[in-house]
């Protein structure tokens, strides 16, 4: 248990109707009481809300004059689950505004909630002060709290305590950060699923089975010289196979999870004047990028995002695209490759007036990559009245399908025809990633890395079993695999990893 009582603003920076300051720790109620003019918080029941004032001055003793205590059940909060009821106790007798005196300054009129351990987010005593949402008031309240013994919380410290005190595991703690950062439906849903413990429960089942085998193997070691086998090697092989399979599925799901959480990076590439800005604008349905007939005028650095079916698609900056095409023409493809390196989908835009099929083919072959979906987008079809597909398209089709790409769209960015098809291709790209067995989706790079390491060690154990390795070494490999699996939930982890995870949280979380 941490001894310090910490405090921080829990609400967003800036002005709001209300703000909340949260205190957590063994002294939370005592410190709050020293600043509070109202009921004696040290005597009130847990999970109750109290009206009063925050004052800067001598400690306030409770008047205890409120006899008429109204109790009202209000909505439970996610961070206080398991709480049977949450009550508001109204100090109806506090009707007159007290005034500041020489020894005591009234800072704000507030509602103070008292939550006693262990049924709180941190599993410590927690006090929440709702004040009028001015940053200045927040600062003054924090100053008074610190004066009475609280310490300003570090980034993520409340959540870290929730983890340290066993209320949530590490994967769940990380999902809270994800939930706060979620910008769309998809990322909210995956974060919430992880907060419910999705990934941890999936892994702990596998881990427990492995743990059982490890115990049996270690028992064999205890018997040393005697040639006994407690762990059934056939059953163990089966378990390892199962583990490999499940870990593989989880690892596979990362691509999809990452797309949901962070969005999909899309690059629109094409020669100058191919219509890249026009297409981007058509997708955005807003004239945000600069569209010009003079090649090279799209110089703004832009990252535009569109949300399709709850997933974010991020379009890399158009200024970069312009440079990219310059580079392709003048220097070579190295620089262009860097630009396209992080993209998952590449919309290659061309028009018949200004390109040849050979150019397009050369480009696609050059930029083809296993994890990059290249979509050919034939623009300015309004300028020709060819049958579909025309000779230009047929040549591309013949040369490039299906090894290099499998999608050719005919659009007029200017007239906004075919734009829906572009959107459909993007949506389908994400839908196809979903094609995996695991119910749980990995969205976190750290989990992904830990899973890959786990898989690696499971493969080593498999090797060890099949080569009839010495029991001692087998036990070592098994321990290793267990540790890797335990890293995700935080059972095996070190301070550096923890510090790194929690430092990414905002203060007050
Ligand atoms: P970028 O350099 O690739 O970004 O190209 P722009 O989007 O700036 O477009 C260059 C020129 O082509 C502009 O005059 C556009 O109006 C024009 N353009 C773009 N798309 C189409 C189209 O589908 N049809 C026709 N006829 N012109 C287009």
Image: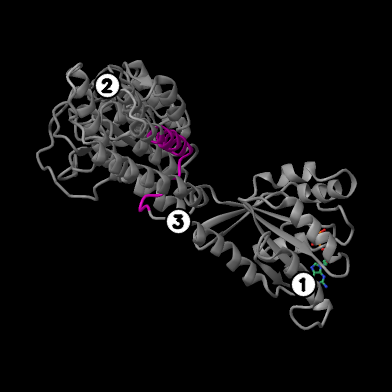
Image check: 384 left or right of 438? right
Secondary structure, magenta segment, majority class = helix
Give residue 412's position: percent from left, percent from top: 75, 73
* Colour logic: one colour
- Taking depth in this image into account, of 90 and 406 the one nearest to the observer is 406
Residue 33 x/y as whole percent: 24, 24
Q: Which disc is residue 31 wearing?
A: 2
Mark drawn on residue 393: 1
Residue in front for this viewpoint, 209 or 45: 209
Mark 3 vs mark 2: in front:
3
Q: Which sits earlier in the primary sequence, circle 3 or circle 2?
A: 2
Residue 312's quadrant in the figure?
bottom right
Residue at disc 3, secondary structure: helix
Q: Quadrant of ligand 1?
A: bottom right
**What x and y, as percent, mark residue 492?**
34, 26
Secondary element under disc 2, as helix, strand or loop, is helix
Q: Place residue 172 in its image quadrant.
A: top left
Say whether disc 1 or disc 3 marks the residue closer to the N-terminus: 3
Mark 1 residue element = helix
| Image x and y of residue 268, in percent | 72, 56
- Whether residue 201 is visible, yes or no, is no
Task: Work out which quarter of the rendered image holds the N terminus and state it.
Answer: top left
User: How far apart, in angstroms, are the residues tagged by discs 3 and 2?
Assistant: 40 Å
User: Is ligand 1 within 8 Å of the beta carbon of the residue shown at mark 2?
Assistant: no
Quadrant showing the C terminus: top left
Work out whether 155 lies above or below 209. Answer: above
| Residue 406 shown left or right of residue 428 in the figure | right
Q: Start and end of the magenta stretch?
A: 438-459
Q: Is mark 3 within 8 Å of ligand 1?
A: no
Per the image, the residue denoted by label 3 is 185
Query: Which of the two marks, 2 or 1, is nearer to us in this view?
Result: 1
Q: Residue at x 66, y 60 (%)?
A: 403
């Amino acid at each position: 248990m941490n001894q310090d009582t910490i405090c921080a603003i829990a609400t967003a920076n800036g002005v709001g109707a209300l703000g909340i300051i949260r205190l957590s720790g063994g002294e939370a109620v005592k410190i709050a009481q020293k600043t509070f003019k109202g009921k004696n918080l040290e005597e009130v029941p847990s999970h109750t809300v109290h009206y009063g004032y925050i004052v800067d001055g001598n400690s306030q003793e409770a008047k205890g004059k409120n006899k008429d205590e109204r109790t009202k059940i209000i909505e439970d909060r996610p961070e206080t689950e398991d709480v049977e009821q949450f009550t508001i106790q109204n100090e109806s007798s506090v009707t007159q505004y007290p005034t500041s005196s020489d020894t005591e300054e009234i800072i704000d009129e507030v509602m103070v909630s008292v939550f006693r351990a262990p049924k709180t987010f941190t599993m410590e005593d927690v006090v929440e002060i709702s004040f009028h949402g001015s940053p200045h008031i927040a600062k003054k309240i924090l100053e008074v709290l610190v004066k009475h013994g609280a310490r300003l919380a570090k980034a993520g410290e409340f959540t870290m305590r929730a983890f340290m005190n066993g209320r949530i595991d590490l994967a769940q703690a990380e999902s809270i950060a994800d939930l706060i950062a979620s910008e769309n439906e998809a990322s909210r849903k995956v974060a919430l699923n992880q907060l419910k413990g999705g990934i941890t429960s999936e892994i702990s089942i596998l881990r427990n089975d492995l743990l059982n085998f490890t115990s049996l193997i270690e028992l064999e070691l205890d018997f040393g010289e005697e040639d006994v086998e407690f762990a059934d090697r056939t059953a163990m092989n089966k378990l390892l196979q199962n583990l490999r399979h499940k870990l593989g599925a989880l690892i596979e799901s990362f691509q999809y999870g990452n797309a949901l959480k962070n969005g999909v990076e899309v690059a629109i590439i094409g020669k100058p004047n191919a219509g890249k800005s026009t297409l981007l604008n058509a997708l955005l349905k807003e004239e945000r990028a600069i569209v010009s007939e003079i090649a090279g005028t799209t110089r703004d650095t832009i990252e535009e995002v569109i949300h399709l079916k709850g997933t974010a698609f991020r379009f890399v900056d158009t200024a970069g695209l312009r440079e990219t095409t310059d580079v392709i023409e003048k220097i070579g493809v190295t620089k262009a490759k860097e630009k396209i390196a992080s993209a998952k989908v590449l919309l290659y835009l061309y028009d018949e007036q200004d390109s040849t099929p050979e150019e397009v083919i050369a480009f696609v072959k050059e930029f083809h990559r296993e994890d990059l979906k290249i979509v050919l987008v034939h623009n300015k079809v309004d300028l020709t009245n060819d049958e579909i597909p025309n000779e230009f398209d047929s040549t591309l089709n013949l040369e490039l399908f299906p090894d290099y790409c499998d999608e050719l769209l005919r659009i007029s960015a200017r007239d906004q025809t075919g734009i829906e098809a572009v959107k459909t291709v993007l949506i389908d790209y994400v839908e196809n990633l979903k094609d995996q067995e695991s119910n749980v989706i990995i969205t976190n790079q750290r989990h992904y890395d830990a899973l890959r390491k786990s898989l690696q060690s499971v493969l080593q154990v498999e090797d060890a079993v099949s080569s009839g390795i010495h029991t001692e070494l087998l036990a070592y490999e098994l321990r290793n695999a267990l540790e890797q699996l335990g890293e995700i939930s935080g059972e095996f982890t070190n301070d550096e990893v923890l510090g790194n995870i929690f430092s990414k949280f905002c203060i007050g979380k």
